[in-house]
Image: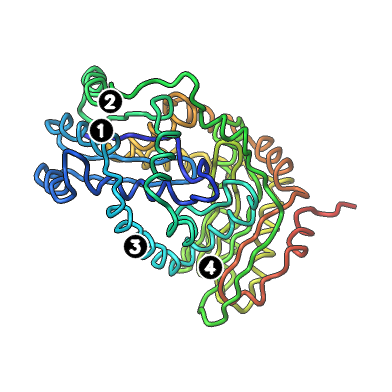
Amino acid sequence: ATVGVWVDGGTRFEDQRVNGVAHFWEHLVIKGTGKRDQRGLEAEVENIGAHLNAYTSREQTAYYAKALKKDVPQVTELLANILLDSKLDAAAVDRERNVILREMQEVDQVPEEVLFDFLHGTAYQGSPLGRTILGPEAAIRSITPADLKAYIDEHYKPHRMVLVATGDIKHEEIMALAEANFGRLKADPEGKSSLDFVCETPAYFIGSEVRVRNDDQPLAHFAISFESCGWSHPDSPVFMVLQQLLGSFDGRHSVLKNSGNPLTAAFAALPDCKSASTFNTTYTDSGLFGVYAVAKPGNLDDLVHVIMNETIRACFKVDAGQLHRAKNAVKKSMLASLDGTTAEAEEIGRQMLAYGRRIPTAEMFARIDAVDEDAVKRIANNYFYDRELAVASVGPVHSLPDYNWMRRRTFWNSY
């Protein structure tokens, strides 16, 4: 079974001065409590063969443990202990500060991670979604125990937390465990919801470009994106289908030259393209939909031409056969993502925070089946045609066309 706590709080809800505090707290919670020191906590988890993990995103933070059914009460108590009673002494904060600074150095060596931080930074510049999850180095060096406590006191409240259990466990059992271990959390009638924070500082998409040219790198990495919709928007399922419809490409697989996905087949004909994938990143009130590509630096303009041409083509023409395959691919991907109790717990936690309920698979399938050619053309015209875009690139990008060249290709002249 998997037991976890999903919190409706992430980088988006931080103050600019302490950007990175949500991720900082995620590191600290497993470093010891008043009841367990770090060594005792780690030994306890290992002795029962459990797996304890956590992650922070821009809008959510999760803490979960996978263990045998008989150990569910123990891991539930452990999760409550680390979330409600973690130490906040200055020495522990300073030790973890150095760990996070080393982690930042490692992340800076991963081009994809750097690129998508740049993409968010330029697309949502001036709004909270543009901040990085780890935060800037200056903020990490200045965060104090008082800053961490202030963030926890404001955001870790019952109405913004979900306890999830999946596997061989009954609902009544987890309800009793929740009352026993989390019952001392007091409801705050005056507390803000995440939607209140979103309304106060909404995401503003800005058409813009950032490029970091480094000719010493062997490959160019770039992403072209448009603004899409939020989690609960009716157009969200259409974007899921369109992502599969455009497809992805990996140059190591020659069979993709015969792919039914237009973007995949077009990339397969370009020898400089190493890989490309369509991404669909969704938040409460906004999202980013686009293509991320990795290629040799010679002819990036050819790749960008393919991306813009195939994306805007969806405004005018959608093949019924390709759409049918894309919808089946979305369904298969949804079912494959539920392979295991941890994946299922993550879906439940995310959906409870985003939608306020668990959406049955049958309902999601019905939404996918309802997507037709007109729906795809409608959202392509509404979100892509003659719309601003955000572009980020790193590496040897001297042959990448400029922003105005791409912006001009968000529409087709008809005579």
**Circle 2/circle 1 CB separation < 8 Å:** yes
Report crowding for label 1: few under 14, some 14 to 19, many 20 or more residues within 10 A (C-alpha).
some
Closest to the observer: 154 or 284? Answer: 154
Specify the amino acid type for callout 1: Ala
In the rendered image, which residue does mark 3 sit on?
98
Real-space Cα separation, disc 2 to disc 1, in angstroms: 6 Å
User: Which of marks 1 and 4 precedes in the sequence?
Assistant: 1
Q: Is residue 108 left or right of residue 73?
A: right
Where residue 77 appears, as percent x and y from the top left, is 20, 31
In the rendered image, which residue does mark 1 sit on?
80
In the rendered image, which residue does mark 2 sit on?
182
User: Considering only vertical position in the picture, is 388 above or below 233?
Assistant: below
**Secondary element at tag 3:** helix
Real-space Cα separation, disc 3 to disc 4, in angstroms: 32 Å
Report crowding for label 4: few under 14, some 14 to 19, many 20 or more residues within 10 A (C-alpha).
many
In front: mark 2 or mark 4? 2
Closest to the observer: 117 or 271? Answer: 117
In the rendered image, which residue does mark 4 sit on?
294
In front: mark 4 or mark 1? 1
Q: Is residue 202 left or right of residue 276?
A: right
Specify the amino acid type for callout 2: Phe
**Residue 60: quadrant of the picture:** top left
Specify the amino acid type for callout 4: Val
User: Outermost residue toward the bottom?
Assistant: 216
User: Which of marks 4 and 3 precedes in the sequence?
Assistant: 3
Where residue 192 appears, as percent x and y from the top left, is 51, 27
